[in-house]
Structures are given as structure tokens and as C-alpha cells.
Amino acid sequence: DRTMPLSRHTGQIPESTWTLGFREMTEPWKGAVGCLGVAVFFAMTIGIISWQALEQSPEEWVLRGRAAGMLWERGRGALLLRALPAGRPVLAIAVGSVPATEPPPPRDRCWHDGGQFCYSWEEDAELRLSLEPPAAPGTECYGVRWTPLRPDVTLKDCFSMANVSWYGGPSMRAQRWPLNSAESPAQPLVSGDLSTNPAGFGPVLERYFLGSTGVTVTVAPEVSLLLSLESHRQFCLETPAGRAEPLHYQLWNPSKPARSLKCILKDFPSCRSPIWRYHGPEGSAAKIKRGLRSLVRRLKRHRLQEGVVALGERGTAVLAATDLVPSERRKRQALALVEPLELSITLSPYTGVTSPLFLRSLRGGEAAGCWLSRQPRPGGSSIPLLTTWKGQLCARLNVTSEAALGWYLARARRLRQVLGATYVAFEGVEGNSFLEQDVPAPAELAGDGYTEVLAAALATLGNGTIISAGSRSSHLPLFIQMSPLRSDWSHAGLKGLIPSVLHYSLLGYNFFIPDAVGGSMAGATPGDAELFVRWLQIVTFLPVMAFGTPPWLCCDAWVLNLTRQCIQRHQDFVVPLLLKYSEEWQSLGYPIFRPAWWLSPTDPAAFTIEDEFLIGDEVLVAPITEKGQTWRDIYLPGEGHLWLDTNSARVFDGGTMLRNYSASLAEVPVFVK
């Protein structure tokens, strides 16, 4: 049997029943169905958007290395540095110069180069991230370069302090360790004189910032830069407004907490004996000589006959005016002034506008070559750039002139010989005179160029040279004179001493001369014997011991006896340690004076300790810095290490906290590993 096919209607396709039904609907029902359709459409759209938002991470990788990588955080417009492979946060940089709402795409115009990421914010700025050759094995370097696309764009990157402790950068009036608790408005990152500008940056400064996560931020010297510090929040690097200059810095990760620049010091400066500052009469050469002899006699009487007598700039100038012609007889007389002690004299690169030296240079038409001068207008002549030094209107040595610099060095050598000096101290090395007066500077003197050039020249005088500032000169055989501190217990006084020690040493300036015991600036507690003793106990363990007020003038006989003991301990115990660790500094770049976290780099408790320090890896000094206190808590770093208490001969484990450690006024807690 054959099955017949079903017949099919070949006429017009009949309308579907739902269409017919819709036509037959009343108007209210038609509106309801339309609304339903619109609702379904919006629901589908929102769903798609939500799905995309969930799928798309708020952080986007823009550049990857082997050990770390850079991400862009969309929400707040920030660059993130994360360690690989776990993605541990290392650094967060808030970008304050471009729209945060416009995130860069995953690929950019540098897509062909895996070692770069480039992106432009139209009419604002261009960002270029790059992987750069590492300076040491096992490290990675990321270059960050912002270029403004309009003259009125100010480039500003801010580095978060959240869960990161920061060290390095500039010295300040009330030094802090770490920098997180410091506060400063935006100002040029240039060294300065804290005695004339207490709110500015101090004389030792490097464009180097070390984070407790192991990251280092460095900025090239040619970058015009302002730095601001917002306490416990962030520090910011920015370019000067209206100058359309790029902002360029480097991120190193991981970075050992030491200078990347290895020190090449050949002749270490040495001063085993204390420095005694002369504060006697300076009205005439005869009065100065009598005052020096009187000081030496008193030192001998109190059995302190070793050391260096330091003569200030005014006293040096008075003696130099009468002893300019060298002779064997005059040299013997000069040496006899302070025998058996040694003499230190003081000079500066300034000269008063009424001095014979400056007037002679004007008459001879040599002023423009000898002294810093304003850039002449077309067809005009140079005019000396006058500034103020110690209350007088002065001109400043032109260090870009070989003739002027050669004359200055020859004069220093001649005075050292004529006056029989072992040491020559140079004040006024810090600061940018052009920047202070808002005058364009020559390219070689931009930023801290003056300090760098003058320090390199002064280093040729030998390792008996002391200078008042340091910037890119930590490799030179020079002493650095620390800034004056107040005679009180604040961070501008005694409490700021150890943070300054750690700051100077981290930046590579290990051979420094601390301020005089007790402080040299008037404070809230002048003549405080307790302050003198606690100060003395700290400087015993530093490179040089310096005194302004002799102990027999400020304190009782027992303090004088304690001073003798501390000087002996410095010579027998501390100086050999310094010589030992100066070799490690030279070979590895490690600081001599180290923070507690040096031996406990993963313990957050060690990151904020600012009242104790290590000499190398083997001696821990934990003095008392609170008035009236005879106990303190002491952090012993280095889990697995053992520490011997030199006061009690007891042994303690490292990585622990000693609570309520007792130390009388005559004792300083010192532990040997």
C-alpha cells in the first residue's frame, strides 16, 4: 500500500493567531504589552553591562617584568607596582595631573615593544612606562616619564604611605624616621640652611626614597622638582608650574636598603679625638690668641689635652688678616697656639660687598668671573648676584670659573699652612642662590649643582676637609657637619639626633660631625646637666665627638669624669668599629649606622623605631631620650641572633622587645651581638 502525501494549501499564508489577537486587543492592553517589551530590553541591557563590569577588573596590567609589574587602577587613577607571582602590593602612586576617569586601554601605541607602555591624555599629558636595564642582578627598574602637552599642566605623582614606611630624601629641622610623620608644603627639592629657613629642607639631601616594601624611587638631578610631605598620607613629586617640564623618575624593585651608587672612597677621614669649639673673644688677633691659649690650658688642667680646637669663620678671618705672609717663625707660633691639640679653621665661599677682596675685584673688572652673577641682557654686562650671609650683604664664589675656584683653593691651602691648621671647615656650601632670588641659573648650577661642584673641588684639599652640605657627594673623602640642634629634648633637639644619624648614613654620608653635645641653638632647657649627659652618651658612638660648652662649665665634677670615660670609650671601642665597617661601606655600599629593620626587614615593628641604631651588624645602641626617664623599651633586632648586654652581661634573643629596661643617668644601654 502506498501512503498518499498530505495535501498542502498553496494559497496566501494565513495570519498567525497571536497577530490577529493583538489586532483585536483593546488599546490599554496594547500599551501594557509595549511597556513589557521595553522593560525586557532594559533588563537585558543592564544585565550585559553588569556582566561586563564583573568580568572587567578595576586593575589593568600595563607593563610586566619578571619580578614585578605595573598596573593601572581605574577607580582613583593610580599606578600600582605589584610583586610577582603572588601580586603582593609594593607601591601605589596617585596620579594628580590627568583625568582619573579615562583609563588607558590594555594596548597602546607602544604595543610593538613589550618593554614599554605609552598613553596620551589628549591635551594634558603623555605617560611612558619602560623596563630599563637593571643596575644589579636580581633587581628590576621601571622608568616613569610624564611629558606635559600644554604649558599650564603641572605634573604631580604622589606616593602612598599606607602600609609603607619611607626613608631618605631631604634632611629637615625636626628630623623624623621614617619620613611618614614629617610635614612640608611643596617646595624645591634643593639643600638649604635651616638656621635661616627652618621650614625648608636641610643641607644633606638626595633624590632617593626607600620604601619598607623594598622599592626605591630615584629622580635624576636634571629634573626640576618640588617635594611635598603630607604626614602619614603621602609624599608628592611635582614639576614647577608653568614651565612645561617633564617629570621623570625610576622605580627599583626589589631594592636592598642601600645606595645603588657604590662608594669609591680611598682615604677615609679620621678624627679619633674630640672637637672643642672656641667661643672666646674675637675682637682682635691678639685677643683670639690669648683666648685659644686659655682654652688649651683649661683642657690640659682637666686632663682633656687631646683633640681639635675649632675656630669659627670670624676668628679665622681676623687671624688671616694679620698672618697672610707665611714664614717658619710664624708657622711655629701658630702651632704653639693650641699645642698639644690640633687646630681647625673655618672658611666660606662668601665675601662681604665692603671687603677689600670684593672691592678689588670690582676695580679690576673681574667681579663677573670671581662671583656668581646674573645672566646679562643682550648688550649688557654681568652684575654680581648679591645675597645675605650671616646678616651681611655678600657675593658668592663663582664655582664655574676655573680661575676663581683655583684661587679659592690656593687661598685655603695657604691659610691652612700659615695658621698651622690640621682641618679646614667650609660653611655655606648648601643652597641655590639663583633659586632663592628667582633668577635663572646656569645649567651646571641648577638644583644642587653648586654644592656638588664645590664639594668635588674641596675634596682635593685632603681628608682633613669638613663641609656643611652634601648632595651627590657621598663618595668623596669629606666630613659633613650636621645642622645645629636646639638645646632641648624635642625632635629639633636631642630626639632628632638619632633620626639624623640614620638619615645621613642611609644616604651614604657616614663620616659626619654631630652638633655640639647639648645642642648649639638656644632651647627650652639651657644648662641642663641631664640633657648634656644623655647627649654625650649618644655621640660617644658616632664618628666624632664635638663640644661647644666644656663639661666643667655646665655640670658637676662627675659629668666631667664621665666625659673622660666616654672619650676613652670612643677611641678604644667605637673608632675600630667604624674603620671595620667603612670597608664594608666601600665594597657593598651599606651604611655604617643602620636602623633596627636592617636585621629585621620583615618585622613591621622595626620600621618605625627612631631611638636606637646599629653600628654595622654587631653593636646596638639604645640610649634614653626622654627627660627624667631611667627606663625604656628596647627592640632587639634579628630573629635567631643573640645579644649580650654590656651593662649586665646577660644574653637576650633577637627579634624580641625588652620591656622596662632600667638605665640610670650614668648608663647607656649597649648590646653586642
Image (cartoon, helix red, strand yellow):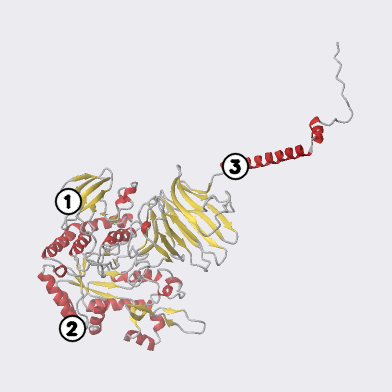
Residue 87 visible in this rendered orientation of the protein: yes
CA gap between label 1 and label 2 equals 48 Å
Foreground pick, 494 / 342:
494
Whether tag 1 and tag 3 are in contact, CB under 8 A, the answer is: no
Distance in Å between CA atoms under marks 3 and 2: 90 Å
| Residue that numbered label 2 is attached to | 286
Residue 199, compared with residue 503, is above or below; it is: below
Amino acid type at mark 3: Ser
Q: Position of residue 236 (x, y in %)?
A: 44, 60
Q: Quadrant of residue 322?
A: bottom left
Query: Which mark is nearer the camera, 1 or 2?
Result: 1
Q: Position of residue 468 (x, y in %)?
A: 31, 69
Instruction: Classify mark 3: helix, strand or loop.
Output: helix
Label 3: how many Cα within 10 Å (few below 14, some 14–19, many 20+): few
Residue 189 in which image quadrant:
bottom left
Residue nearest the viewer, comparing 260 with 240: 240
Q: Nearer the viewer, residue 551 or 342?
A: 551
**Image height check: is 546 above or below 322?**
above
Query: What number is the disc on residue 54?
Result: none
Q: Mark 3 points at which residue?
A: 50
Report the residue marked by disc 1: 646
Identify the amino acid type marked 2. Ala
Can residue 618 be seen in this snapshot? no
**Dot 3 or dot 2, earlier in sequence:** 3
Farthest residue toward the top? 1
Q: In this view, does 259 lie to the left or right of 7?
A: left
Q: x%, y% of residue 263?
A: 33, 59
Instruction: Decide which of tag 1 and tag 2 comes sooner along the chain.
Output: 2
Alpha-carbon span between mark 1 and mark 3: 67 Å
- Check disc 1 and give the amino acid type: Thr
Packing grade of label 1 (10 A; few <14, some 14-19, many >=20) is: few
Query: Is residue 250 shown left or right of residue 19?
Result: left
